[in-house]
Image (spheres, rainbow, N blue to C red):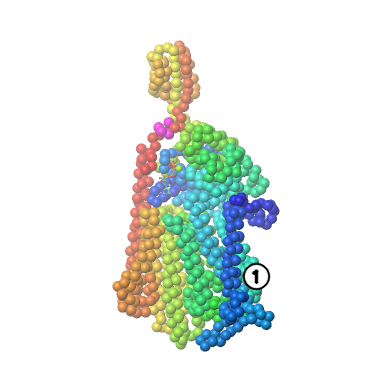
């Protein structure tokens, strides 16, 4: 019962060529495609489809009942005093008239969402669990030593580890296709939907692999945490879609681009449902969403294209980082040069979703309010991005020590060149440059689009970037600590600096309006800059720079000390050896 | 530089303010069997890991047959030349012996039909033919070790890095292992072995390196090491009086000390070459001493190593 399914039956087929070209894929499939597993997967796929269909059939009118029955799939509207009701009627032949198009469409949507959740949540879980296990056992290190490229190994993992989920989805596809065609969705759109779901898999799987290759000093809960979080976010994003009344002219609507289910909007629209309604985000809703004031998501082709592009580009970034990470788990996650490119790409997109309306805003109060509100989200998003950069760019203790020690011998580069471009140098300068890139890109639109009274937004942004810089030096400082769990420590320290002040202030009932000055030093200074004088802002910025300088000096001193003590150890050894 | 299978320059590795390997310039000629010895914590494993690209050097360069070894995606060909057997060898418990070797043969780009031939070949070499359908989880430790060795050589590397390959093997298995190594050396591989079983190394190696506190304190051919550091010993037995023999010996300047080990048997610390040895024998015979034993032996690697009185890293 447990034997392998024959993989080699036709030695020259495309299938065996694929397996020959990617040993990792071969190994994953060999381990998982057992007859027992396949039977189980087929059974699960069949049961899920069966239950879904039975559930939907249960919504249809009871054939034995002669009285009027009302329900979702009726086609007769009965007008009543308070609300109209859709009920079933019989035609001349005595059969119930049923809105089959709506029924099939419902089936299509349910199957799509089940598929997306299965692929993304279970798929990422399997990938992370598998990779973390191999990393823990040390077997991944062997694979690193073979002449296989990182790309080939990682691709093998992505294609191979969730192979059972892929099988289940493949078994779901025929019914999915039939349901789509029966509800009059054009075939091309169904295929475009499937392709986009694939693209989303590519992105989330790359992200999952990247996550599993990060070293936090704890690995036990990695897979549960990541796929749980993803499942939760996906549930949230899908709930917004199904609710159908979301206001999309908002910065956060960006996140919907990462839920492939948003494509269903176009598919539902293209089915030209003749009767009845479906509670799902409509294309009219999507028209509210704009990018630099352009409503780009109204047209089906452009909308789908953009969503696909979004996934592809993020996948590209993840893949590039992943390949570097695979061979050098000790290096920083991002190289400094890459981080500049990433920021130069991230800032325009974030700004695009901030500027939701293009018209002359000074005259329309509502829009100005909306945009200034979006800027708060932009600032938070930028701060989070900055935190990510701190995590991705800061080298750890030994790397830093080695850098400080061998800087002169190794490269002979000037200190500034090392700090800006060298991957082992402290991250502070590079983070400052990244933040500067973002600020330079964002500033013009604050002054050009918003009325002068909104210039506090600019100071909010500046304050938040100095804040991030402060976190960066503190994190870098903590990363030179001697303890093993220094990553956790620096994360805890920065997180508490973000979370504790607002909580304390909140507990003390000191709101932004009562003493805004204190809030300048919080994670969201942009909410406070509106209520303080320029002098207070200047003092806050100066204070932060002072702290940054002191901590940086302290760290430089520590690096020098460490170098000196290492020299002493070495001298001692030479002495013991020569005796 | 091309003549060296391995050449390192200023190779250094630090961990957390601790210097594991310090400025090592190691040179190993092609075709050599190089033994790496040293007390626990001397840095042998760290050095070998760097040579196998399993660890990133803090500083320094590694050249294999004149090609710079870097730790990234760019050196498929160099990686194809290295076979590395780490001191702990994680295996996949869910695979059979055959599938495991097949997986690695694929990773090292062996194509059919060569792949199956090669797997049979290495299985025969490590004598695991009859176990090829067993799950790895069911193998004994020695078998696992041999399987790992098979994996290490599956792609016919020209440089073998073996980190304590015989620890945990029974004497018979160790002897088999030595035989395998000899076969591999005859096939032209350069082999670097770190081991604490010095008698094995003495039998296998052409050169040795001694590491201590992260330094490579000695790196030389085995014959040279013996010549410089090992004292020769002569064991003599006589039927006659011991006093006469001792008196005769004391006249020879190359005889340093001796030790009486039985009634009429003694052991000499001798500082001289082969011809001096013959000369001594002749003089003793000429002096009419009834010798029944004249046995020349050399101090073994183990006692040389102990004599050096190495420091344990602490
Ligand atoms: N990953 C690591 N992190 C910190 N220190 C390490 C690490 N690996 C090795 N060391 C230290 O480096 C030194 C050299 O270790 P190494 O394993 O190379 O010694 P060895 O010569 O192989 O010893 P043994 O004969 O016991 O195998 C040891 O003191 C060890 O504590
Ligand atoms: Mg060791």
Q: Residue at x 64, y 81 (%)?
A: A90
Tell me which image quadrant ligand 1 sits in.
top left
Q: Is residue A140 above or below residue A304?
A: above
Nearer to us in this view, A138 or B95: B95
Residue stretch in magenta: B303-307
x%, y% of residue A283? 56, 79
In the picture as drawn, the residue positioned furthest to the left comes out as: A508
x%, y% of residue B288? 45, 11
**Residue A503 in the figure: left or right of residue A221:** left
Q: Residues within 10 Å of mark 1 (few under 14, many from 20)?
A: some
x%, y% of residue A121? 52, 64
Q: Is residue A566 above or below residue A384?
A: above
Q: Residue at x 45, y 56 (%)?
A: A219
Residue A102 image-quadrant placement:
bottom right
Q: Is residue A486 above or below residue B230?
A: below
Q: Which residue is mark 1?
A: A178
- Chain identity of mark 1: A
Evaluate whether residue A379 shows in this view.
yes
Nearer to us in this view, A279 or A383: A279
């Amino acid at each position: 019962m447990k034997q392998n399914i024959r993989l080699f039956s036709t030695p020259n087929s495309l299938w065996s060529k694929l397996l020959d070209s990617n040993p990792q894929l071969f190994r994953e499939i060999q381990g998982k495609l057992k007859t027992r597993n396949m039977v189980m997967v087929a059974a699960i796929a069949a049961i899920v489809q069966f239950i879904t269909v039975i559930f939907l059939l249960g919504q249809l009118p009871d054939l034995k009942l002669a009285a009027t029955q009302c329900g979702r799939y009726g086609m007769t509207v009965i007008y009543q005093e308070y609300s109209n009701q859709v009920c079933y009627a019989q035609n001349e032949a005595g059969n119930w008239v049923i809105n089959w198009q709506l029924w099939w469409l419902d089936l299509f949507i349910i199957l799509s969402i089940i598929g997306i959740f299965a692929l993304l949540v279970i798929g990422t879980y399997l990938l992370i669990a598998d990779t973390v296990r191999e990393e823990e056992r040390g077997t991944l290190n062997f694979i690193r030593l073979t002449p296989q490229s990182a790309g080939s190994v990682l691709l093998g993992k992505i294609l191979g580890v969730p192979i059972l989920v892929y099988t289940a989805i493949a078994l779901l596809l025929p019914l999915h296709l039939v349901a789509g065609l029966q509800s009059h969705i054009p075939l091309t759109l169904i295929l475009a939907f499937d392709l986009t779901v694939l693209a989303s898999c590519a992105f989330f799987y790359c992200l999952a692999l990247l996550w599993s290759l990060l070293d936090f000093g704890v690995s036990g809960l990695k897979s549960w945490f990541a796929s749980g979080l993803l499942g939760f976010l996906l549930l949230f994003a899908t709930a917004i879609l199904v609710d159908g009344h979301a206001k999309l002219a908002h910065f956060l609507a960006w996140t919907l681009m990462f839920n492939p289910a948003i494509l269903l909007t176009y598919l539902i629209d293209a089915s030209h449902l003749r009767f009845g309604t479906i509670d799902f985000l409509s294309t009219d809703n999507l028209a509210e969403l704009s990018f630099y004031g352009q409503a780009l998501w109204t047209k089906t082709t452009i909308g789908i294209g953009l969503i696909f592009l979004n996934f592809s580009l993020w996948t590209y970034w993840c893949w590039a980082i992943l390949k570097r990470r695979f061979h050098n788990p000790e290096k920083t996650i991002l190289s400094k040069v890459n981080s500049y490119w990433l920021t130069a790409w991230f800032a325009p997109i974030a700004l695009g979703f901030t500027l939701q309306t293009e018209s002359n805003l000074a005259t329309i109060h509502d829009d100005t309010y909306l945009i200034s509100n979006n800027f708060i989200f932009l600032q938070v998003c930028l701060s989070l991005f900055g935190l990510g950069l701190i995590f991705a760019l800061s080298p750890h203790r030994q790397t830093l020590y080695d850098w400080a020690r061998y800087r002169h011998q190794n490269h002979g580069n000037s200190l500034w060149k090392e700090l800006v471009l060298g991957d082992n140098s402290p991250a502070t300068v590079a983070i400052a440059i990244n933040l500067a890139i973002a600020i330079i890109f964002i500033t013009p639109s604050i002054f050009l689009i918003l009325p002068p009274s909104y210039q506090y937004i600019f100071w909010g942004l500046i304050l938040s970037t100095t804040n991030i810089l402060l976190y960066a030096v503190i994190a870098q400082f903590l990363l030179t600590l001697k303890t093993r769990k220094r990553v956790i420590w620096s994360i805890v320290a920065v997180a508490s600096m973000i979370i504790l002040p607002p909580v304390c202030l909140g507990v003390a009932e000191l709101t932004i309006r009562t003493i805004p000055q204190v809030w300048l030093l919080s994670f969201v200074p942009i909410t406070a800059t509106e209520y303080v004088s320029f002098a207070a802002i200047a003092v806050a910025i100066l204070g932060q720079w002072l702290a940054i300088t002191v901590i940086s000096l302290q760290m430089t001193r520590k690096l020098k000390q460490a170098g000196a003590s290492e020299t002493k150890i070495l001298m001692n050894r030479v002495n013991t050896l020569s005796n | 530089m091309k003549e060296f299978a391995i050449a390192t320059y200023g190779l250094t590795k630090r961990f957390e303010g601790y210097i594991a390997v310090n400025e090592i310039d190691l040179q190993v000629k092609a075709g050599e069997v190089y033994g790496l010895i040293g007390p626990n914590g001397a840095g042998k494993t760290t050095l070998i890991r760097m040579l196998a690209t399993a660890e990133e050097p803090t500083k320094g360069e590694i050249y294999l047959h004149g090609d710079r070894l870097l730790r990234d995606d760019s050196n498929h060909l160099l990686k194809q030349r290295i076979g590395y057997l780490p001191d702990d060898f994680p295996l996949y418990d869910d695979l059979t012996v055959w599938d495991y070797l097949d997986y690695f043969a694929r990773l090292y780009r062996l194509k059919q039909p060569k792949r199956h031939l090669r797997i049979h070949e290495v299985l025969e070499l490590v004598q695991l033919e009859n176990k090829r359908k067993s799950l790895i989880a069911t193998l004994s430790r020695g078998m696992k070790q041999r399987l790992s060795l098979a994996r290490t050589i599956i792609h016919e590397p020209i440089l073998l890095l073996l980190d304590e390959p015989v620890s945990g093997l029974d004497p018979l298995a160790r002897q088999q292992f030595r035989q395998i190594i000899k076969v591999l050396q005859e096939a032209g591989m350069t082999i670097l072995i770190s081991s604490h079983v010095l008698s094995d190394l003495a039998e296998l190696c052409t050169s040795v390196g001694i590491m201590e506190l992260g330094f490579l304190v000695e790196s030389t051919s085995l014959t040279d090491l013996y010549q410089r550091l090992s004292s020769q010993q002569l064991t003599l037995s006589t039927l006659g009086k011991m006093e006469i023999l001792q008196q005769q010996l004391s006249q020879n300047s190359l005889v340093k000390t001796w030790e009486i080990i039985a009634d009429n048997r003694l052991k000499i610390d001798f500082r001289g070459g082969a011809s001096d040895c013959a000369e001594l024998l002749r003089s003793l015979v000429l002096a009419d001493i009834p010798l029944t034993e004249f046995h020349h032996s050399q101090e073994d690697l183990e006692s040389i190593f102990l004599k050096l009185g190495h420091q344990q890293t602490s």
